[in-house]
Amino acid sequence: MRCEKPFGVPEWVGELVADLPPLLTTAEAVAVLRCSPRSLYRRVSEGRIHAVRVSDTGSSRLLVPRGEIERFLCELAQAA
């Protein structure tokens, strides 16, 4: 998923997400976004980042698609 921007995708975004796995764990996502887990959960609950919640044994796990990380970073770059 590429962000639509008149000036193109910032080069640093493409480089940052190129080697990421298709689905990132909470720990991986907060490391890439350089935010706290609480900030990530807040952005997910606000709908700013879309994530998949997986529950297998009663506890749930949040997974963030690589494309969502790229889209969110593109939005931040556009706002700057």
Image (tube, rainbow, N blue to C red):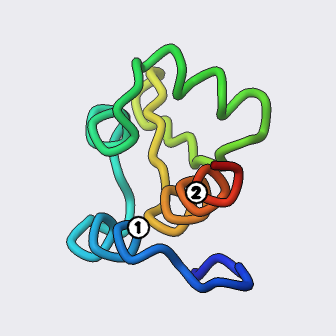
Could you say where residue 24 lies in the image, as x and y percent from the top left? 35, 51
Q: In screen coordinates, is 12 left or right of 75?
A: left
Q: Which residue is mark 1?
A: 13
Quarter where residue 12 is shown? bottom left
The reply, left or right, for residue 30 in relation to residue 48 is: left
Q: Nearer the viewer, residue 69 or 64?
A: 69
In the picture of the structure, the residue carrying the numbered disc 2 is 77
Relative placement, left or right, of 67 versus 18 is right
Which secondary structure lies at badge 2?
Answer: helix
Residue in the picture at 54% in, 79% down: 9
Q: Quadrant of the N terminus?
A: bottom right
Compared with 18, 64 (above or below) is above
The answer to the question of whether label 2 and label 1 lie on touching residues, with beta carbons closer than 8 A, is yes
The numbered dot on residue 45 is none
What's the amino acid at mark 1? Val
Q: Residues within 10 Å of mark 2 (few under 14, many from 20)?
A: some
Q: Nearer the viewer, mark 2 or mark 1?
A: 2
In the image, residue 71 sits, relative to residue 47, either above or below, namely below
In this rendering, the answer to whether 14 lies above or below 33 is: below
